[in-house]
Image (cartoon, grey):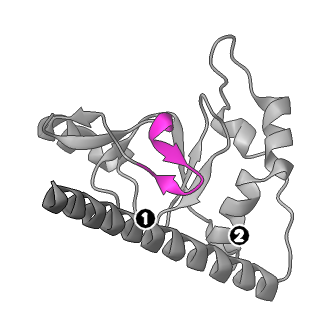
Amino acid sequence: MEGMPFVRVSDFSRFGIEDVEKKISEDLYETFKKQFQPKAGEILYTKDGTIGLSNVLNETFEGIVSGAFLRLTLKHEYHDLEKEYLALILNSIVCRLQVEKLSGGALIAHLKPSDFETFKIPLIRKEIQEQIAEKITESHRLRTESKSLLEQAKRMVEAEIERAA
């Protein structure tokens, strides 16, 4: 299907936006991109369905996210909080336990944005946050590299099989 990516919770993990299958028309994308297009530096956080998955976007995503996401930015008074550290805490048991207490919904779990604002986030020294952020960034880089190498190996094996046949 032609169109722009439409990200649902099922297309998202703590590693970020995965393979997006659902598409929307260019016209619909233009209508909703101002409100729903995630930007570089934002933290995406799932508030419906599988609540509590978060990831920092390194680049603006060319598509839109469903209303099941919160797009988080840090207020000026929290500018020295490392976003990667915050995303790690939001993915941790510390916040999952808070989500379990707050989430409602008969069929699909749901967290209201006002509930999210009550989360207790443990703060640690800036230099330790920076070390954690560096390790997370390196982990994401290595994960991307390993995916690329795996795809390259698959193509090489397929080419060898075709050549031998």
Few, some or many residues within 10 Å of mark 1 (<14, 14–19, 20+): few
Residue 46: give x, y in percent of width and height.
58, 41
From mark 2 to mark 1, how far is it between C-alphas?
24 Å
Q: Answer above or below: position of 60 versus 68.
A: below
Q: Is residue 67 above or below residue 86?
A: above
Extreme-top residue of the structure: 106
Q: Which residue, given by chain and number where applicable, does mark 2 sit on?
A: 85
Q: Position of residue 106 (x, y in %)?
A: 69, 11
Closer to us: 97 or 152: 152
Front-most of residues 100 and 135: 135
Q: Is residue 122 left or right of residue 29?
A: right
Q: Position of residue 107 (x, y in %)?
A: 64, 12
Residue 50, quarter of the rendered image: top right
Mark 2 or mark 1, earlier in chain: 2
Specify the amino acid type for callout 1. Answer: Lys
Residue at 29% x, 48% y: name it. 63
At x 43% / y 36%, what residue is drawn?
8
- The crowd level at tag 2 (other Cα within 10 Å; few <14, some 14-19, many 20+) is many
* 2 in relation to 138, above or below: above
Asked if residue 16 lies left or right of residue 112, the reply is left
- Residue 112 placement: quadrant: top right
> For the point 55% across and 57% down, which residue is it?
15
Q: Tell me the tag on residue 147.
A: 1
- Region in magenta: 9-18
**Residue 104 visible at all:** yes
Q: Position of residue 114 (x, y in %)?
A: 69, 38
Q: Quadrant of the N terminus?
A: top left
